[in-house]
Each structure stands twice: as structure tokens, then as C-alpha cells.
Image (cartoon, rainbow, N blue to C red):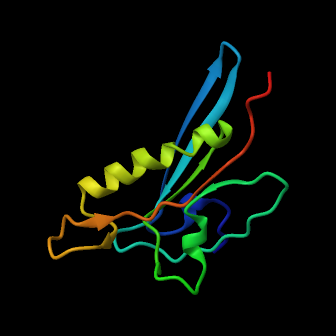
Amino acid sequence: MTVDALTDVAGLLVGHATRTGDGWLTGTTVVLAPEGGAVAAVDVRGGGPGTKETDALDPRNLVQKVQAVVLTGGSAYGLDAASGVMAWLEERGRGVRVGPDPAHVVPVVPAACVFDLGR
């Protein structure tokens, strides 16, 4: 079996939104891991990388799985899209448990952005 797309990986869900027109040409993609999370890794490069929570993926850290990954435009402004994904996951009790109540979770959602603000 050949795997050519993220959606070919069993259990992953992918959503995307694009904004175009009036000088806009940007978008955001969310890769949602199955319940229980997924193992992830990162390689950050470039002279001005824009990332959020990618340090959590270092194998020396406590985090073992992510609940989602956000890839976005909008430069550093786009990274805030991960906050909406975190809120959605938290409402569903998905994340690293941080208390005795199943609702006490912190979703791990690494994000990376590209600079697409030039007009």
C-alpha cells in the first residue's frame, strides 16, 4: 500500500481553511490525531522560524504524544490558530491529564507557520 497523503494514514483527520481575496492568500491546516494522541517529531530550520510548542516534542521531555498539529500561514499571527484547536480538544477531555478530574487536561498542539504577509 502506498501512502501519498496524510488522509491515507489510518486514524488521522485533516481539515483546512483558506482565505483569499482582498489581498489575502493564506490558510490553516489541522492534523487531528486519533484519541490517545500520536507520536510526533520536528525539525525546525531557517533564519526566522515561527513555531509554537515544538520544543515539547524533544524526546527528553515529558510529552510523549500530541493531540493535533497546526500548519498555518499568517506568520506569527497564524500560530494563534493552535489556541482554537486546543480549546476544542480540551472541551472533549483530550490532552495530557494534569489533575484527578478527566476534564483536567492540557492538549499538546505543536504549530508551525510560514510568512505569507507580503503583498
| Vertical order, 114 against 92 (above or below) | above
Q: How many marks?
A: 0
Q: Residue furthest right?
A: 47
Lateral position of residue 35 relative to residue 103, left or right: right
Q: Give the quarter of the image for residue 114.
A: top right
Residue depicted at 14% across the width and 71% down the height: 101
Residue at (46, 76) in percent of width and height: 65
Residue lying farthest top? 22
Residue drawn at x 50%, y 43% as measured from the top left:
81
Position of residue 67 relative to residue 21, above or below, is: below
Q: Position of residue 52 (x, y in %)?
A: 58, 57
User: Residue furthest toward the left?
Assistant: 101
Image coords of residue 87 (percent x, y):
33, 49
Q: Quadrant of the C terminus?
A: top right
| Left or right placement of residue 118 versus residue 31 in this view | right
Question: Taking 49 as reference, is 99 above or below it?
Answer: below
Asked whether 36 or 5 is in front, the reply is 36
Residue 70 horizontal/vertical position (percent): 55, 52
Residue 79 pos. (x, y %): 57, 46
Residue at x-position 68% and y-position 40%: 75
Q: Quadrant of the N terminus?
A: bottom right
